[in-house]
Image (cartoon, rainbow, N blue to C red):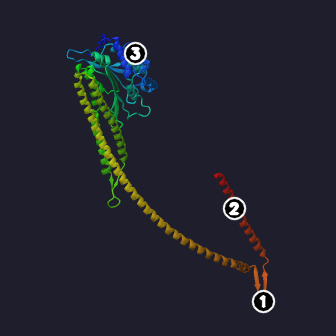
Amino acid sequence: MLISAPPKVCLTTSPRSWSQKKSMYQNSYQTGQIYPTERDEYANWETYPQNLHVSPLGVDAYRSSHQIDRLSKELFVANHESSFDFLAMDPPRDDSCRDAAWEIIQSFERLDALMELGQATSVFSIHQSYTWSRLCISEEHFRRLFTRLGVHPGFLDIVFLFREKLGPVEEGFSSAFVDIIHPAVHDIQVGTTQGCSYHIGYNIKYVARHGRALPNDPFSIREVGVYQYFSSDTQQSNWVLLQASDRIKDRLRRAFQSCDDTLPKMQFLLHSIILLDGSEDWREYMIYLEDEFTKLVDKGFFTNLKGSLQEGDLIADFSDLRKLQILTDKLRRLAHILKLNIRLGNLLKRDMARIKASSSSDLRTNCDAIRRSLDKYVLDQETHFDRLETLIARSSGIIQLVQSIQDIRSAEASQQINHEMQTLTEQGVKENKLMKRLTEQSTRDTRSMMTIALISAVFLPATFLATLFGSNFFVYSQPENSLTVASNFWVYIIFTAAFSGATVLLWYIWRQRRLQRDKENDMEAL
């Protein structure tokens, strides 16, 4: 098992002559390759990646350093919260196996102590508290670690994906690079080369169960960033993992327990472990998506059918159409992710062929093994992609069918509405004709009443005089042919004037009060 304070072991690398160092750095500047410095592992760590020996024609190190400063609050935690993992390995036993375990590092004093052990392989894992959070490493520790390992600046594009998600998420972004460093001309001439050095960096997206009650989809999209640097000169290999799952970390730990299978020059085989592990849950997720799609189709077109209005009519409830649209959008996003993974697999296959061409004969068999693993990975991803394309095509056909049914129903509804509008128009015409007849009848009645009023006006004076002279106030004597007026005729005149005046007065008072009340109501309305 691992011991807490192992003895200090010196590096087993052989010293280089000044001519070899000069040739190495000249080749670095001309080809844009990166070599970690040998004198001070943390020299100018504050300016990473500007402190690396890289040609400005290849990578804009100043821009990358400035971008780290700009995104530091979204990428990193404070120094006292910084924590990352290191795969510590014991020396090999007689059976060519060793113990390996992940150890948490919270200070660079502990990192220096572990790095001084002289492990030929250094594996670091930087994690996040959760998918949407920052990396659990401080900016200082990040720059120091990447300076010590000489991490290629091209890997920073992948690092920036793992910042705190406060804005739009780059779900469809994928980056990968393989930078092969061919041996220097001097080493080839003297025959001391042991193959090529290389940087490999990429991010792979995979699905995994999230274990939460919500959302209803039990799977979520996750990604892991991978970086490896192998030096053919020192036969050392450095790894950096970003947000690696516990399963990937455990598989790597068990793989590194075998010394013969994980020699630094053979560690490019481990990429197949990471890629194949990331594709394992895709098949289960495809089964879940196909099942959900089938349930939506069955529910939307069979169980929710209603009775017909007319013979041959069929009314379907399309309430699940929105769910089908959401599922189709998800399928398209997953298909895009699988295309990115397929592109990554093909890129690694091409570059592994380049590494194979520059490797020694004893490693070419292993190169064939990882090619077979990459072929399997690409085949699995293409199979899942084809299944998604089939679901998307079926969904598009169903949506078009539903749209056609809706168009037919809309045309029928429009025709029915037009028919009802025509009926209402005809009914309105009939009502207008009836109103015309009623108006004409009312006009005739009005004329009749005018005639009656005119006749009444003509006979009204005679009626008044007949009523007046027929009263007891007047007496007509036949013999004398004389008309006698009663002495109390004044009573009639007084009472008539009084009652007439009272009537006019009451009407006037009522009219004034009504006008006052209407005025008050108008004032309140204003």
Q: Amino acid at mark 2?
A: Arg
Q: Disc 2 marks which residue?
A: 511
Please identify, in this view, whether the residue under mark 1 or under mark 2 is nearer the observer.
Answer: 2
Residue at the spot 75% in from the left edge and 68% down from the top edge:
498
Mark 1 or mark 3: name the one nearer the start of the chain: 3
Please identify, in this view, whether the residue under mark 3 or under mark 2 is nearer the observer.
Answer: 3
Residue 440 position in % (x across, y down): 57, 73
Mark 3 or mark 2: name the one nearer the start of the chain: 3
* Foreground pick, 297 / 483: 297
* Foreground pick, 5 / 161: 161
Q: Amino acid at mark 1?
A: Pro
Rendering quarter of residue 117: top left
Q: Disc 3 marks which residue?
A: 42
Image position of 457 (left or right of 135): right
Residue 464 position in % (x across, y down): 71, 77
Q: Mark 1 Cα within 10 Å, few/some/many (few <14, many 20+)?
A: few
Rendering quarter of residue 160: top left
Mark 1 or mark 2: name the one nearer the start of the chain: 1
Rendering quarter of residue 178: top left
- Looking at the image, residue 236 lies above or below residue 369: above
**Quick one: SS at disc 3?**
loop
**Residue closest to the far front:** 189
**Quick one: SS at disc 1?**
loop
For the question of whether residue 91 can be seen, the reply is: yes
Q: Disc 1 marks which residue?
A: 479
| Cα separation between marks 3 and 2 | 106 Å
